[in-house]
Amino acid sequence: MQAYVLTRYGDASAMELRDVPEPTAGDGEVLIAVRAAGLNPVDYKVRQGKLRLVTRLDLPRVAGSELSGVVEGVGGGVSRLRAGDRVFARVDKKKLGAYAACVVVQEALVAKMPESLDFTDAAGLPLAGLTALQALRDELGVTAGDRVFISGGAGGVGTLAIQLAVWMGAEVATTASPRGEELVRSLGATTVIDYQNQKFKDVLSSYDAALDLTGGQDLRDVFTILKRGAKTVTIAGVPEPATAADLGAGSLVAAVLWVASAKIRHQARRSGVGYRYLFMRPSAEDLGLLAGLVDKGELKPVTDRVFPFRQIADAFAYLEQGHAKGKVVVQM
């Protein structure tokens, strides 16, 4: 079967289309015929080697973090899914494998995809949706009446985070370009800052929580707009020591992250706010919640562009430009 394989760490040439053996489902696993797969910044960060400290991979390896498809077969002990089910999944971070004609995934990570979606829209939902849900619900504890700031609201995670925050009863402010303003307002953002012409720190204040999706100066500025005692969760900043526990890493990794994140944690403390880096966790249960929201019309995936699988290198080049509004997906 054909697959997009990470051969080494490096630039775009480190990934290539290859023929690889088709996998077989073992105990507790399902074999999925992939219909579409989502592209994410984490995928090219893995390729660049930026996550080697926390996620070590044996290379070469089929790349890819999320997918939609049809169950082709099941291994022993699988009871929730059967052949023919339309499913979606965020695959195991240490195994990857979504960019292929077929993939084997643990049943605990796979859920039936929303009935109202086609495969391309469903493929872009797992990673971004789980990230947004777990950041807002589990880390920030967003409740009705909260004022939440989400940077980079027109991106893959941002478009879903805005909708989920609104579903939780929050009032949302975000940043977007003039081209993305209409989109984020349609998703429920009530305050939109044009980041090309204005700094959000000059406009916003006394927010209850923040989800940082852009990092850099934006992350440092986020601390200044929050109430004292509020919390920032980032997916674009520097991982902190608690991240090691999230990934099951040892004390050495925790110590390295303590040093690496010392400056940003100090800046957060000086502003009187909390700081947390989030590595989302794959979860069939949470995917089921997201699927239910989609089918109820309370959550709408936003797909920017769909490329044929043979053009996946072009899809990554487009994604890495950083201008996509919503998700970039490849279709098998």
Image: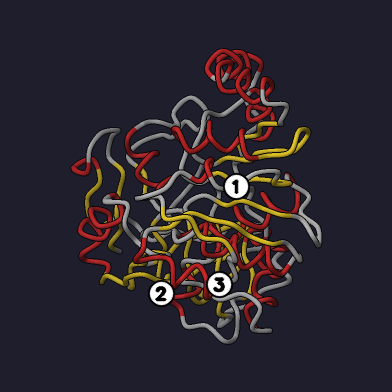
**Depth-wise, is mark 3 or mark 2 nearer the camera?**
3
How far across and how far down the image is residue 274, in percent? 71, 31
Question: Which residue in the structure is indicated by mark 1?
Answer: 204
Query: Residue 238, relative to residue 109: is it above or below?
Result: above
Hey, what amino acid is under mark 3?
A: Leu
Mark 2 lies on a secondary structure that is strand
Query: Residue 83, relative to residue 23: is it above or below?
Result: below
Q: Is residue 17 left or right of residue 239?
A: left
Residue at x 49%, y 69% (from the top left corner): 32
Mark 1 lies on a secondary structure that is loop
Hey, what amino acid is under mark 1?
A: Leu
Q: Is residue 106 left or right of residue 10?
A: right
Residue at x 47%, y 65% (from the top left corner): 67
Screen quadrant of the C terminus: bottom left
Q: Is residue 274 left or right of residue 261?
A: right
Name the outermost residue toward the right: 144
Question: Which residue in the structure is indicated by mark 2?
Answer: 35
Residue at x 40%, y 65% (from the top left corner): 180
Residue at x 41%, y 71% (from the top left corner): 303
Screen quadrant of the N terminus: bottom left
Q: Residues within 10 Å of mark 2 (few under 14, many from 20)?
A: many
How far across and how far down the image is residue 203, in percent? 55, 47
**Depth-wise, is mark 1 or mark 2 nearer the camera?**
1
Counting residues from the start of the chain, the first of labels 3 and 1 encountered is: 3
Mark 3 lies on a secondary structure that is loop
Counting residues from the start of the chain, the first of labels 3 and 2 encountered is: 2
